[in-house]
Image (tube, rainbow, N blue to C red):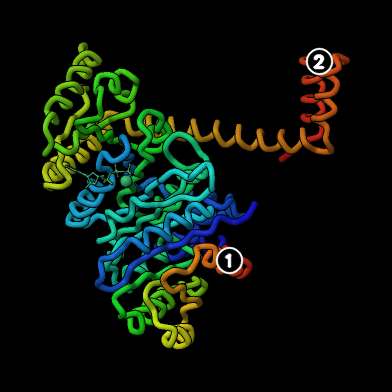
């Protein structure tokens, strides 16, 4: 039997629009993953500690406010510091193409801009499956 | 001792989380891990929180954590949500209501999917409790799936079961008749800010008066709460404390815990034998041969089954 993958979906930052985050959470559930949703306005520390306690394989960050260049790398750093070295972190939301390369350099494995088909996210997750061990 | 067990005993969050995953995933080290941890447990108070969907279990839990933290207690929560039978996935949403405790190092919250297990909890819940108990949390609280009437497993897992009921469930009496009342040690009427909360309380009292007609001193406590107005939470905490002292002193706690161990022995042995038998039956298509023999009426059911069972017992000298 295939290992059940656990995914944390979280919204750092101050924007309160969680439709996108909830949509992706539901879609990933329908794809067979166990999805934990933290809700909006999460601090990097709260996201990191949640990721560790829930022992997730992936953390998906959703952000519409434009603060991704600061917040995404900070979340990555906080998760690594908390000991989540193998957690794969991806991001989504309104993110300009120009910012993507820098975010990837800072530990965000993939960025899915608004309108990306869910299947693309699922394919990404499945491609990482090999690296995940418990 | 395996290193992970040592880290759990030292109270390391990451190790505790990882140990629970191993238990959930049936990791090869699972049994060694639990066996190493088990002698260190027995110090946590284990509370079950059950009740219909949306009755306010997670909201109450959030507030109860506040109170216990103010009293200096450490708390672990296991919040169970259902796995979709169609996709195998799950949305684990209870945590959302307790998320303000995420950065508190003395609160550990773990969401758990039922993974096909019936009874309101997951198959791994009982071993996860052992992990948390060994890690030394003062209180462990299990929030069940809100399914209504079948979350009986929680009775076997916890020292004290709290059953949350709310106004507007439709036919209250029906719910009370159906045996739900059997599973609560403490009854919580939540959403007391709503009309008819008093009526729900009166219904419960009515049923309890009947049940304990001969021994009214044993009647279960009923607590009225409102999670939105943060009403009744102190009373709830006091009620839990008092109930705990009572069952500790009158021997009920010991009896319950022994009952739990007994049930678990039976469950585990049955589950192990079942999986061995399954494997044996499907080994080299041997069940198919039995099917054919019976279908063609060449054999008779009990003869063939006893014969097979004897062969199983002969071949399996040990696990
Ligand atoms: N009016 C009122 N609403 C409440 C109260 N407690 C909870 N709610 C609301 O009831 C809804 C469900 O609350 P939850 O705490 O998620 O209930 P739950 O029992 O954990 O739900 P499930 O885990 O999905 O079964 C939310 O919208 C809460 O705001 C209360 O005391 N009064
Ligand atoms: Mg809940």
Which residue appears farthest toward the front when viewing the image? A115
The residue that disc 2 covers is B303
- Location of residue A123 (image quadrant): bottom right
Q: Position of residue A100 (x, y in %)?
A: 45, 83
Q: Is residue B8 visible?
A: no
Q: Residue at x 27, y 30 (%)?
A: B185
Of residues A18 and A38, the one nearer the viewer is A18
Where is B250 relative to A96, above or below? Answer: above
At mark 2, the secondary structure is helix
Q: Are marks 2 and 1 in contact (CB under 8 Å)?
A: no
Q: Is residue A81 left or right of residue B75?
A: right
Q: Residue at x 18, y 21 (%)?
A: B203
Q: Position of residue A26 (x, y in %)?
A: 43, 54
Badge 2 residue CB within 8 Å of ligand 1: no
Circle count = 2
Where is B41 relative to B14, above or below? Answer: above
Q: Is residue A87 left or right of residue B311?
A: left
The residue that disc 1 covers is A123
Where is B173 relative to B24, above or below? Answer: above
Chain designation of label 1: A
* Mark 2 Cα shell of 10 Å, populated few (<14), some (14-19), many (≥20): few
| Quadrant including the C terminus of chain A | bottom right
Of residues B140 and B49, the one nearer the viewer is B49
* Foreground: disc 2 or disc 1: 1
Q: Residue at x 11, y 47 (%)?
A: B229
Where is A121 relative to B287, above or below? Answer: below
Image quarter for ligand 1 equals top left
Q: Position of residue A80 (x, y in %)?
A: 44, 77
Q: Is residue B223 left or right of residue A94?
A: left
At mark 1, the secondary structure is helix
């Amino acid at each position: 039997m295939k290992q059940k993958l656990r995914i944390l979906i979280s919204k750092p930052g101050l924007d309160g629009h969680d439709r996108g985050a909830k949509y992706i959470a539901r879609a990933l559930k329908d794809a067979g993953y166990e999805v934990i949703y933290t809700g909006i306005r999460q601090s990097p520390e709260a996201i990191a500690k949640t990721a560790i306690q829930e022992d997730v394989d992936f953390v998906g960050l959703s952000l519409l406010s434009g603060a991704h260049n600061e917040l995404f790398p900070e979340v990555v750093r906080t998760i690594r510091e908390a000991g989540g070295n193998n957690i794969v972190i991806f991001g989504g939301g309104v993110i300009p193409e120009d910012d993507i390369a820098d975010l990837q350099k800072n530990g965000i494995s993939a960025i899915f801009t608004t309108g990306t088909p869910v299947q693309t996210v699922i394919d990404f997750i499945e491609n990482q499956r090999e690296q995940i061990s418990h | 001792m395996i290193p992970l067990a040592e880290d759990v005993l030292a109270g390391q969050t990451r190790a505790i989380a990882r140990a629970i995953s191993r238990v959930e995933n049936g990791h090869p080290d699972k049994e060694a891990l639990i066996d190493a941890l088990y002698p260190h447990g027995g110090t946590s108070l284990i509370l079950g929180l059950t009740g219909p969907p949306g009755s306010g279990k997670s909201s109450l839990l959030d507030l109860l954590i506040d109170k216990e933290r103010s009293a200096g207690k450490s708390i672990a929560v296991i919040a169970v949500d259902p796995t979709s039978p169609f996709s195998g996935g799950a949305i684990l949403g209870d945590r959302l209501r307790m998320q303000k405790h995420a950065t508190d190092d003395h609160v550990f919250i773990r969401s758990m999917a039922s993974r096909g297990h019936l009874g309101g909890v997951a198959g791994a819940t009982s071993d996860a409790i052992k992990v948390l108990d060994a890690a030394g949390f003062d209180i462990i609280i299990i929030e069940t799936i809100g399914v209504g009437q079948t979350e009986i497993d929680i009775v076997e897992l916890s020292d004290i079961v709290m059953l949350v009921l709310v106004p507007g469930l439709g036919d209250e009496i029906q719910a009370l008749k159906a045996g739900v009342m059997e599973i609560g040690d403490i009854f919580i009427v939540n959403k007391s800010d709503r009309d008819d909360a008093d009526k729900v309380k009166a219904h419960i009292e009515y049923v309890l008066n009947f049940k304990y007609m001969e021994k009214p001193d044993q009647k279960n406590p009923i607590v009225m709460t409102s999670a939105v107005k943060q009403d009744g939470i102190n009373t709830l905490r006091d009620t839990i404390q008092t109930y705990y002292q009572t069952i500790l002193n009158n021997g009920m706690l010991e009896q319950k815990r022994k009952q739990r161990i007994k049930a678990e022995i039976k469950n585990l042995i049955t589950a192990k034998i079942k999986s061995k038998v399954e494997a044996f039956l499907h080994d080299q298509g041997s069940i198919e041969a039995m099917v054919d023999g019976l279908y063609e009426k060449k054999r008779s059911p009990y003869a063939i089954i006893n014969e097979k069972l004897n062969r199983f017992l002969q071949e399996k000298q040990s696990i």
